[in-house]
Image (cartoon, rainbow, N blue to C red):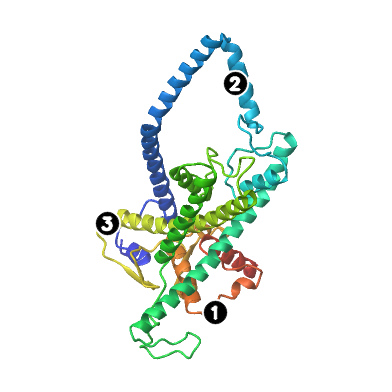
Amino acid sequence: MAQRRAAGGCCCPRAPMNEDNARFCLLAALILLYLLCGAAIFSALEHPFELRARRLWKQQLNNFTQRYRVNLGALHTLLRQYEEANGAGIRVDTLRPRWDFSGAFYFVGTVVSTIGFGMTTPATIAGKIFLIFYGLIGCAATILFFNLFLERIITMLAYIMRWCHERRLRCAGVGVMSSREEPPDEDDSLEGWKPSVYYVMLILGVASVVIACSASTLYSSMENWSYVDSLYFCFVAFSTIGFGDFVSSQRQQYESQAAYRLGNCLFILMGVCCIYSLFNVISIIIKQTLNWILGKLVCPGSHQKKHNRIHGSVETVCDSETDGAAGADGIHVGRRLSGEMISVNEFMVSNKVSLALLQKQLSETAHQGPRPSYGHQNGFSGGVGALAIMNNRLQETSVDR
């Protein structure tokens, strides 16, 4: 027991599984619980409406067949044929052509952005086969674009937060020195300041709301949707869920049609980028919550704390059995001993490291410090979050080999 305490550094009983597997199982259980709760709520909200709609449809169908003396079987056959035509883009209302150049461009945009509304889908075998290869490269390139967009958003927000902090200090009468000047004494007013990732989440959330509200105003006037339906469409589209029950820019004619379609594309692009960035930041906070839950489950009542001054954060952790490889600023990244080039442990890194990397980039950018140069030795850039872990591991592996 004494050797175990000395080696592990934690006085609590050892968990039956390592930290990564425990976090994965906990997240899977919470997601399952989240799905069960969501299913119960949506079933309670939507199922009565479905039953009423089904009864109304049967009543209308019976009234139609009796009034016009139409054979019910023949009517069902016609309706099935219409469903097949509907899949090819045929609608009762006049809509714009689906597969002219502008319609095809709208379609490939929904493919590479992973929105996939479903209003337009390839009907030919050649089109379906081409979509597989086209989407494979296009979706990968778009995900890379979103990650690079996130990195630049963080850079911009770090500069803005630093400027606001300096302005607040000047208003308070405190002297501020540029980070490019010689390092000052211990009383430098910016020495202890670190931009917070939670402010980034707040700013991205506000930006997403502003974009969604602005886009909803446009859609409600141009598509004749209610404002709530427009907000619903914005979230479904921006989050790339893409149900397809509401799809913008589908009618054949609009007032100021060219301007509307351009505005529609810009709103969707900005909204998807902001929501993707917001999802990444929220996922980091979710992982921090999982770590906190695991700390309570594995070490209940333990007062052993590691005060990691990683940009002002204090974390309660227990040492793990992974081979801790010290990174920048003393951040330890657990590595597997399997020799994988990109291990799951490093790609899906613990929230402590993801949060530290994100805050580290915020701090370095805000202080105009030098960016890490090691990532450029082999063509790999640092990136943000999981992308940073993957690229750093690729760079380290290429150096070792």
Residue sitting at x 63%, y 34%: 94
Which mark's residue is nearer the viewer, 2 or 3?
A: 2
Q: Are marks 2 and 3 in contact (CB under 8 Å)?
A: no
Q: Is disc 1 placed on a helix, strand or loop?
A: loop
For the residue carrying disc 3, how many other residues have a C-alpha within 10 Å: few (<14), some (14-19), or many (20+)?
A: few
Quadrant in which the C terminus appears: bottom right
**Sequence-first disc among 2 and 3:** 2
Q: Residue 172's x, y, as percent?
A: 33, 83
Q: Residue 214's x, y, as percent?
A: 49, 54
Which mark's residue is nearer the viewer, 3 or 1?
A: 1
Q: Is residue 149 visible?
A: yes
Residue 79 is marked as: 2
Relative to 285, residue 91 above or below = above
Amino acid type assigned to the residue bearing label 1 in the image:
Pro
Quadrant in which the N terminus appears: bottom left
Residue 13 is marked as: none
Mark 1 = which residue?
A: 370
Q: Is residue 236 left or right of residue 297?
A: right
Q: Report how many numbered discs are placed on residues in the image.
A: 3
Q: Is residue 177 left or right of residue 143?
A: left
Residue sitting at x 43%, y 58%: 205
**Sequence-first disc among 1 and 2:** 2
Q: CA distance from mark 2 to mark 3?
A: 62 Å
Q: CA distance from mark 3 to mark 1?
A: 41 Å
For the residue carrying disc 1, how many other residues have a C-alpha within 10 Å: few (<14), some (14-19), or many (20+)?
A: few
Farthest-out residue, front: 255
Q: Is disc 2 placed on a helix, strand or loop?
A: helix
Residue sitting at x 66%, y 48%: 136
Relative to 381, residue 278 above or below = above
Mark 3 = which residue?
A: 300
Amino acid type assigned to the residue bearing label 3 in the image:
Pro
